[in-house]
Structure formats: structure tokens, C-alpha cells
Image: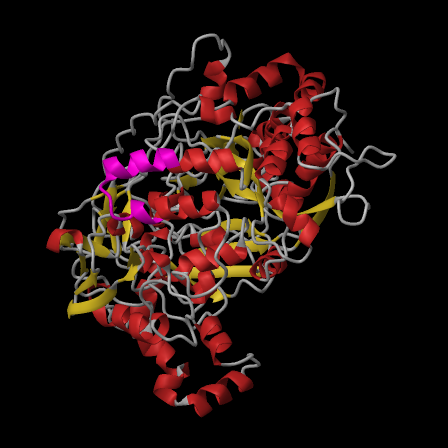
Amino acid sequence: MGIDEGLSRRTFLRVGLGVAGVSLLAACAPTPPATKPAEPAKPAAPAATTAPAKPAEAAKPAAPAATTAPAAAAKPAEAAKPAAGKPEAKLGAQLIGKIEGPEIQKEAKRPAKLGEAPMLAELVKAGKLPPVEQRVAEEPLVLKPVHEIGKYGGTWRRGFTGVGDWENFNRVMGAEKPIHVDYTGNVLVPAVAKAWELRDGGKTIRLSLRKGMKWSDGAPFTADDWIWWYENFYKNKDIQPVPTAEMSINGKPGEMAKVDETTVEFRFPEPYPMFVDVLSAFTQMGGGHALGGTQWGGFLGPYAPGHYLKDFHPTFVGADKANEIAKAAGMDGVTALLKFKNNYALNPELPVITPWRTVTPINTPLWSLERNPYYWGVDTEGNQLPYIDKVQLTLAENIEVVNLRAIAGEYDEMGRHLDPAKLPIFLENQQKGNYKVVIDPKSDAAQVAIHVNQSFEADAEIRKWLTNVEFRRALSMGIDRDQFNEAFFLGMGTPSSLMGEDSSPENAGPEWRTKWSTLDVNQANALLDKIGLDKKDAEGFRLRTDNGQRLRITVTTVAAAFLPYASMMEMVAQHWKKIGINLDIKDTERNLSLKQVAANEQQLYVWGGGNPDIFLWPRHDMPAEPNEPFSGTLYATWYSSGGTSGKKPDDPELLKAYDMLRKGSGLDSAERNKLGQELKKVIVDQQWVIGTVGFTPDLRVRSNKIGNSPERLAWKTRNRTPGNTHPSTYYFKA
């Protein structure tokens, strides 16, 4: 049913749950964005040095947990003290723990004795797999688990919403980035590269790879895999027609070179100190193979298993043979064939370096994965990771089904697609479902943002208004963010523009949190009248200036993804009635919506925004990247391609923002942060993306059977949350 404008959801909950229940919800609200992360909890001392216990019995994919009272869970880290004036905050602190995670042992050598999962030991015994000593890298990633040495075995149950839900497990696979960040998101740490070095005054970035590392099929992983990607994917215009802006400094492209088997270099014509951060972030060059094969056209990385992919590449088999293979596979050409072959979620044959590898693909009702026998990570006692044998993601028709299954205890550890507005129901069912509810506050200023397509061309009248800054400001001031926050986040978020959290070095000051982002119906109406939209129909909606018909703006929402976006926009449509704007809502499957975005068909598009790393993640604040260019497809393509593709904008403010974004890459962090403040001012002032509510709680359920799952995750884009907590160390207690 709809939401009565006079009755907030919190009022409704007070009637249904009672004062105590709502007090708990209020206490669950995250601290204001100015609060810095709590000091990480120290990990527990490791267990005895015996090999991990035999695996727990694998859970069936959709079977709910037992309904008996849950076993006592591990005691959470002591929560940070609440702000004064919140007497019930102690209750909320039970749901928001301290940020914690495993520790990378940077200087550790490979332990003398290695352990392996029983399922792999059986394969070794049968002669189907080499001994563990021959599978684990000579220079592995050594991890100290957050709480204790785990046990092998079990099946991790999750849910997913369809073939477009790549990120559901891409994030879990985040360890395969060139460089990573620790569990706080604040410190760069080794990943695929064991070390890195800036040389030649910042013009050269050298990466040292891990000796003896292997792909999941046992083939060596070396610098040749990076060069193969660079020569045969990145520099091939048929496969990668538009280069990434991340491989250029001030518009001048760099190059990749092999130094030896375990050393690669990125060489640029000018100093590019930020490139180390690029390699550690959620970027086209820093995302890793799993992410690069499922997003950005399917060919970024910056490495690939050439020993496998060459059998389908025209350079190696010839154009005729490659086309023949593509036709036989039912693919629309060689590029489509290679894109499929390079996608770990669709192609179980693809060699990977992630903790798990796909067994049944994402385009089936049960996306399943099992352990990578050659994974290059071990714990401090030498046990090869991951601890968990298998992962099963069960298809859900929509996010409502995902939430119902999570409430019933059918997922072992999951924080994706769960609706914060259902928190009371999750809390009520914790004991019955044998799980614990955890709140992980997010750092984005806009959990829900309305992206206004600046390059829209299909309708000249609509384009005129979408590209008018006063029109965008009026739309923003027509939103009742307080009601939005109450209705969809139980008041636990913060009404906000796209300005980052107060503690961010890119934050330009508290006044930018509310600039053009506070409800003011009178001013919004005055602005719309002033720009020429002063005529209305009998129902009070404004009329087009070209034909006198009602002005109708369409917003695209993504069905079955994260939050009830369509319902949220229904509320915004009600708000905008008061300023005479007719909003039509088009709820669309994610893959289809992305195809429409690629074709520049969107008018408004709902997604997130307000990331604190503007130079590493600008796409959701302005049209700057070819992936998810919701606020201007043609302009994002123009900027990212260095002007070789797309269309140059004529908006001087957007061109100024592009200059600032480009300049930041060559600055040290202090100067870059100052420039970031100025860039964020422009972004907030121009409202290319309209923020609503940010710093919201991310709801996570964690089975009481799961160990080493952190009490709180740090939500930052570069973290690839939960990837920076190395889920390969999660395990089943029994």
C-alpha cells in the first residue's frame, strides 16, 4: 500500500512494535558522518598448530537453519560509546560493532608445513591433483584470521537476483586486485602484487608479483599474463575500442612493460603518483580479472589467462577459425565469444586466481562455486585458503524473496539486497533463524541518487530542461528528504547532497551537505516559473514550451536490486506534484537498463552517489566513466576516451569539472584533497546527480555457525566490501 504523507513509517512501527522496539531502531542509527571509524579490534590468538578439522557437512542451498535457540555466538567487539542524549544507544551498539578484519603478514615467508582441505587431499591421493606444496605459491599471501584459525568444509549459502547480479560475488572475490586495502580501507596492502614502487619521479610504477603463483588450472601466473592482456585485449581496437582514462596522465597515454617473470611496470610520460591508488581501488585497472571480465565491456583487468584465451583469439587461431568457433557457440562474432570466455561467472572453464571458481554459471537458478585448488593464500599456520569448500547462490525472483529467505535463516552470511526498513522483522526472527543481525554503516553521501542525463538527445524539449541547472536545482529542492529517510531507512540515514562524510579530506564544509538539497517548495516553484515553465494544466502540472502538452519526465529504476527503487520514486513523484512536475517511473531489469544507458536513452536514472574518493570513483557523481555513465553517456565516453569517442559537452561547468578531475591524477594526496573539495563544490552546485539520503545502515545477516565474519565491515568503494576482509578466512564452526 502507499505511504500516507501524514504517517511516517516510524509512527507506523511505533504502533506495531511498541516504544521499546522503536527505541532500538533509533539506537541503531549510525553516528553522524563526522565520526571516524572505531579502532580495530585485535584478532584472537591463533589456535593450536594442528591441521584444520574435517569439513562440516555442506548445507543444502535453500534449507533454512534449525529453529531451535541459537548457540552462543562469539562475543562481539566492544562497540563505540554512543553520542550523549541517546539513552537507548546501548541497544543499538549491539548491532554496530567495531571495524575489524584479518591482518596481512607482509614479511611472512611460506610456512614450512602446509595444510589442505580434505576434499583436495582426496584428489591428491587419487592422483588427480599435485601435492599442496606444488600448488601453493612460493611467496603466498599470508593472512592472520580476525578471530581464529578456521576449519575446512561446508557450503556458504547466499541469494542472487539474476544474471546482472555479478557484483554479488565479485566483491567477495576482491583479493585478486593488483594492490588492495586493509579491512579499514585506509591502508594499502599487498594482494596479487607482493610489493610496489614509484620510480623515475613518479613516472613509473613497478609491481613485484608472487613467485610460483598459479591459475586455477595449474598454469603459471606470471608477468606474461599481464602483457598478454595488454597486447591482445587492451591494445586491440576491435576488442577494446576505447582506452581507459586511467591509463593516461593529463591526456597522455602510458604503457605496460615486462621487466622479468615476476615484475611488470606501468610507464607514463608525466608523474602519476595516483596510479598506485588506481591499482588498489574499484577501477578499470585495479579491479582484477573477475571484475574486469564482468564489467566495463568484459576486457579490463589488467591481466588475463592468455594460455586459455588464445584458443579463441583471432591473432592466434586466425580470423576465419575464430569466427567459426563463435558461430558454433551461437555467439554474435568473435568479440562476443571472447567476452563470454573471459567471464568467470558465465564460463566455468575459465582459469581464475580467486578463492573459488564457478561450477554452474550465473545464468542458472543455482550459481555455484567451489574452492580453487591452486589458491595463493594461506593462514599463519600454513593452511591453504579458503576454508569453505563451496558457495551456492540461489536465484530469487526479486529482492522481496531475498529478504524473506534471509529472515527465515536460509543464508549463512549476506549483506546484499537486504532492506533496512525490514530491520524489525529481522530482529524478531534472529533466534528462530539462528542468525545475528549486524549493521554496517555506509560512507556514501547518497545511498539513493537521481542521475540526470546531461547528454540525452531523443527529445529536444526534455533535453533543454535536463541540462538546465535551475531545473535540476528545483527538482532537488522539491524532495522531502526527511520523509524519504523515515519511510525507507527508518530515520537512520542522513538527508544529504553528494558531499562526502564530514571527516573526509574531500569534504568542503557543512553548508554543502544541504546546498540545493533541502525541501523548499516555494523556491523550487519560483525557479521553474523563472526559467519559462510557468504554464500548467488543470491538474497543476507544468506544460512543455514546444507543444503545450504536459511535461513528463521519466525515471529508470532497476528492478530486483538492493532497494525498492520504484517505490522510492513513487514517493518522489508525489513530492514533485507540489512543484508541478510529472514523473513517470520505468522499472527495468538491470541488464536491460544498462543497455538503454549505453544507448543514451535514459532521462533520469536511480542509483547511488556521493563517494568519498572522487578521483578514483567519479562515475556516480558526474559523467566521467564508460561504465554506469548514468548522468551522461556520450559525455562520459568523450572524457574517458580522451576525446576520440562520444561527444564533447558545451556546459562550461562540466568542462571545468573534467579539467579538475584530470589534474588530480598528477598531484600528491594533500594537493589532490584540496582540489577534491573544489570539485565536490562544483558537483553539488550543478546537481548533475541529485542526492537524497546517505550514510545509511547496511543490513547484514550472519549465521551463528559462521566464524571469522567481522563484527563490522568498513563500507568504502575501494574496499570491495566484503572483499577486503578476505572471506577466504570465513569458516563454519561445526
Which region of the structure is painted magenta? 662-678
Residue 149 among those drawn in magenta:
no
Is 506 left, or right, of 327 in this rendering? left
| Viewer-proximal residue among 498 and 222 | 498
| Overall secondary structure of the magenta section | helix
Q: Which picture quadrant has residue 19?
A: top right
Residue at 49% x, 87% y: name it: 323
Residue 566 visible here? yes
Quadrant position of residue 426:
top right
What's the coloring here?
A: secondary structure
> Quick one: quadrant of the N terminus?
top right
Q: Is residue 129 above or below residue 319?
A: above
437 or 275: nearer the viewer: 275
Q: Is residue 477 left or right of residue 533?
A: left
Please, which residue is most extreme toward the right here? 538
Q: Quadrant of the C terminus?
A: top left
Q: Residue at x 26, y 67 (%)?
A: 214
Residue 342 position within the rendered picture, expressed as x and y whole percent measured from the top left: 42, 70
Residue 455: % across, % down: 56, 54
* Image coordinates for residue 542, horizontal then vertical, percent: 77, 37
> Please, is residue 442 above or below residue 88 in the view?
below
Above or below residue 125? Residue 420 is above
Task: Indicate left or right for 83 with 136 as reference.
Answer: right
Which residue is at 15% across, 52% downward?
197
Rendering coords of residue 185 (x, y %) = 32, 39
Residue 627 visible from this viewpoint: no
Q: Residue drawn at (27%, 33%), measured in percent from left and top? A: 43
Whether residue 670 is in magenta: the answer is yes
In the shown orientation, is residue 201 left or right of residue 59?
left
